[in-house]
Amino acid sequence: MHLQAQILNEEEQARVHQQSLRILAEVGVRFHGAKALPLLKAGGAKIDEQAGIAYVPAELVEHALQTTPKTFTLGARNPAYNIPLPASSSRYAMDGTGSFMSDFQTGERRYGVARDIAAAMRVFQAADLGVLAWPPVCASDAPAHSRPLHEFFTMIQYTSKHAQHELHTVQQVPYLVEGLEAVAGSADALRQNNWFSLIYCPVAPLTHDGEMLDAYLELGEVGLPVMIMPMPVNGTTGPASLFSNIALANAETLSAIVVFQLAHPGRPLIYSSATGNIDFRTGAYLAGTAEMGLQSAALVQMGRFYHLPATSAGMVSDAKEIGAEAVIEKMLTTLPGLLVGSDIIVGYGEVESDQTLYLEQILVDNEIAHLLERLVQGVDVSPQRDLFAEIAAIGPGGHFLKTKSTHAASRSREFYKPNYLCRASYENWLELGKPSLYSQARKKVEEILAGPLVDPLPAEVVGKLQDILQRADRELQ
């Protein structure tokens, strides 16, 4: 008796698909860069060369979907963290590339730097439901022309879980490949193990960034999987209709799938999304809303419609600081995706609409994930859970505290025991210093940062990464 949800029924999923096909064929998609349009033209798309727009026929979409793998594994340096996709149960990823960091020592809200990525990865390593790392802040202390390389390599040094990030230009590609091969051990190991992947966000509405897309097409030569994450926002970069925004996001994903599969048939791709909506009172961007959660869940269903691995944004909050509002919005935006079976929900660690990282929020989010996972697991109605004989033996007015089943239940997974929620009596809570969800998580962060690095890279590999970054800093400039 698991909890499940259906946001779109089968007929509605087919409607979204048909609307997306109509968008691709009649409205078209603008592709910047040098590589995509020739591929699309050779594949049979009608091209407006002057506008840079491709009109993609349904047959081309169908062919691309046929060559896209339906199952594969995202590997990790530590194979205990390998992620078979589709997943047997929902797991979680770090939120990525926010602008700001709440300094763990001072509480100052400042721009993120590389050391914040390092600290966040160490905390994320300890979050047991987190399986996919993403640099949570931009490294503002790194040169702009090589910044994503600094972010990627810092992340890899401080977590042994699957590592995902982005690249901005074709010129950065050789440095990234050299570094990833150094970590993997060889070019063949890099291709075979899938330790690393790319996140790719089309530019809503219906546009692809040329330099990034060209770089990602080059990286297809080494087989890096791509998570495609469209981000149209209701009322600004997307239509002010949930259905139409879902169709637009789906069209953007399909357009990316077509290009990646034309370039490298069989390349592993992950269907994802991160929609938002406008605050109609202020014009501000919102992510921690029920509407975002509904659209995320609907798009997971569309990924399943195509039989693809399907992930989603979630665990999102527009709160300006950590606290009750953040917890409420993170639960609100996570539960829909969880109920439709999202493989990976992306959002650990940040508030302020994915802009500000708090280290303790990573562990709070992991606690929220555990609580929601237990909710979705539902009620076990197997014969072993039928305790009628015990009820009969205890009888009216009796007590179950000393029974064997109660003793067994105290050690079972049927009753979740939280790590950071304090369930002591009021008097004991006062004696303990009034611990809260966040104060308990903060103590754990302090413990993690004071402890040894888990699964460190060999010193010679770290040295190679530093050498590559120094060359990139100098040569890309």
Image (cartoon, grey):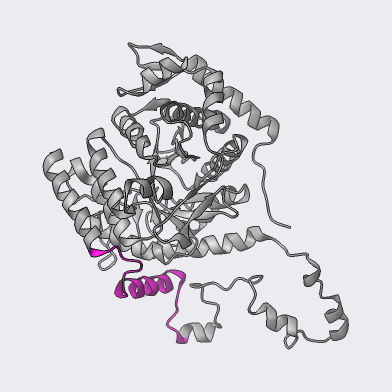
Residue found at x 45% / y 44%: 287
Quadrant showing the N terminus: bottom right
Identify the magenta region. 431-459
Q: Please tell me whether residue 426 belongs to the stretch shown in magenta.
A: no
Above-or-below relation of 130 to 224: below
Residue found at x 54% / y 72%: 418
Above-or-below relation of 152 to 431: above
Residue found at x 37% / y 35%: 220
Above-or-below relation of 106 to 48: below
Label total for image: 0
Residue 268, image x, y percentages: 47, 39
Task: Evaluate whether residue 303 shows in this view.
Answer: yes
Left or right of 324 on screen, residue 297: right
Residue 112, image x, y percentages: 26, 54
Above-or-below relation of 410 to 177: below
Quadrant showing the C terminus: top left
Residue found at x 38% / y 31%: 203
Residue 259, image x, y percentages: 43, 27
Left or right of 274 on screen, residue 392: right
Q: Please tell me whether residue 454 belongs to the stretch shown in magenta.
A: yes
